[in-house]
Image: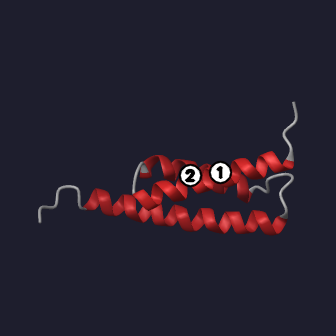
Amino acid sequence: MTVSRADVLASLVEQLEYCERMLAMEARLDLVVVILEELIQKLSSGSPGIDEQERLRLLERARLTYHRAKTLLYLAEATKDTKY
């Protein structure tokens, strides 16, 4: 069974959008970071069948989302025991 180019692209976009939704809710940030690391690796290695412009656009979105997630995760851990 072969995977079409559209399916590969749809899968990558779906994973990225899931991560962006979780980030907006500040939920499951540890999982989001892992998913984004895998996505960045796939997109950096040049996913077959994806237009170069589209791949670079998705890679940029994934990197931005990754850094936001890492920052929020760090802040959550740093303020875990802080009392207001």
Q: Taking 31 as reference, is 2 above or below it?
A: above
| Residue farthest toward the left in the current orientation of the protein | 84
The residue nearer to you, when weighing 63 against 14, is 14
Question: Residue at position x 50%, y 51% from top?
Answer: 32
Q: Which quadrant is home to the N terminus?
A: top right
Q: Position of residue 84 (x, y in %)?
A: 11, 66
Residue 44, picture quadrant:
bottom right
Q: Position of residue 23 (x, y in %)?
A: 46, 59
Q: Taking 47 as reference, is 24 above or below it?
A: below
| Residue receiving disc 2 | 18
Q: Taking 49 as reference, is 68 above or below it?
A: below
Question: What amino acid is found at the position of numbered circle 2 in the picture?
Answer: Tyr
What secondary structure is marked by label 2? Answer: helix
| Residue receiving disc 1 | 14
Horizontal arrangement in the rendering, residue 8 relative to residue 28 (left or right): right
What secondary structure is marked by label 1? Answer: helix
Tag on residue 5? none
